[in-house]
Amino acid sequence: MTALHDYFGQLYRQDDPFGYRQRWYEARKRDLLLASLPRQRFARGWELGCSNGELTAALAPRCDELLATDVSARAVELARQRTGMHAHVQVGCATHPQQWPRGRFDLIVFGEVGYYLQPAQLAECARRMQASLEDEGVIVACHWLHPFEPAQGDGRQVHASLQDTLQLPRLFRYEDADFLLEGWGTSPQSVAQRENLR
Ligand SMILES: C[S@@+](CC[C@H](N)C(=O)[O-])C[C@H]1O[C@@H](n2cnc3c(N)ncnc32)[C@H](O)[C@@H]1O
């Protein structure tokens, strides 16, 4: 049992330790993330660090297949309950970057997980996410900007590390007083171009 397993094991004695089901702050952030996705639908999505599955459930209608993973067995159980009505969603227990799913994805969501990783693990996650990305796929990251325990750094440091490590153009960026939301990918066409607006 690592310190990470121990920390999240304690935390998931509650079913919704981050208030994803209660807080309008979280609902708004989820809506912004969903609105930022540059495609209406994705063939194969993956959410790393899915917690109790609230964001997973919101991503499900946008994906033909969706994988969600978390280090905490209890979080996985909660996410399975939350997404049980979606046969195309698979939830599994995994510690990243040490464990990694097979195949490639056209959507990878890395939300509020980067600061629990050591800097070398974060860089490894970034390299492996890029290697797991389909051509024209998108990696989306979203992180809280303020320091907290047991974070290794704040969201700005997480996103700076992603920006340094990913060899991909940034597609979009949203920042407010509390969080940073960014996406990277190689799509040669903008959303407007795909919709024949230009
Ligand atoms: C703050 S929640 C994020 C939930 C969701 N992604 C979102 O943005 O709303 C972070 C989750 O990441 C998981 N986690 C932390 N480190 C992890 C790792 N190395 N591998 C897999 N999951 C991890 C935790 O168990 C926790 O449930």
Image (tube, rainbow, N blue to C red):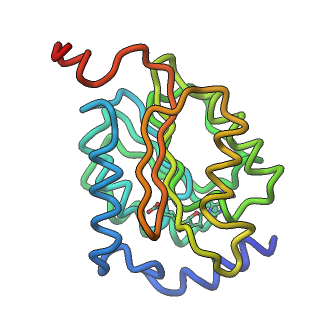
- Percent across and percent down for residue 175 are 44, 57
Quadrant position of residue 154: bottom right
Which residue is depicted at the point 30% across and 48% down? Answer: 34
Quadrant position of residue 7: bottom right
Locate the N terminus and report the quarter of the image it occupies: bottom right
Please indicate whether residue 95 sits to the left or right of residue 24 in the image.
right
Which residue is depicted at the point 46% across and 43% down? Answer: 67
Please indicate whether residue 196 sits to the left or right of residue 71 in the image.
left
Give 15 or 127, whichever is nearer the viewer.
127
Give 45 or 94, whichever is nearer the viewer.
45
Q: Is 119 drawn above or below residue 196 in the view shown?
A: below
Locate the C terminus and report the quarter of the image it occupies: top left
- Percent across and percent down for residue 58 are 29, 54
- Percent across and percent down for residue 18 are 46, 78
Task: Indicate the quadrant of ligand 1 in the picture.
Answer: bottom right
The image shows a total of numbered marks equal to 0
- Percent across and percent down for residue 158 are 66, 55
Give 195 or 98, whichever is nearer the viewer.
195
Q: Is 136 drawn above or below residue 146 in the view shown?
A: above
Which residue is depicted at the point 54% across and 80% down? Answer: 12
Quadrant position of residue 171: top left
Q: Is 33 drawn above or below residue 43 in the view shown?
A: below
Which residue is depicted at the point 68% across and 81% down? Answer: 149
Please indicate whether residue 107 sits to the left or right of residue 155 in the image.
left
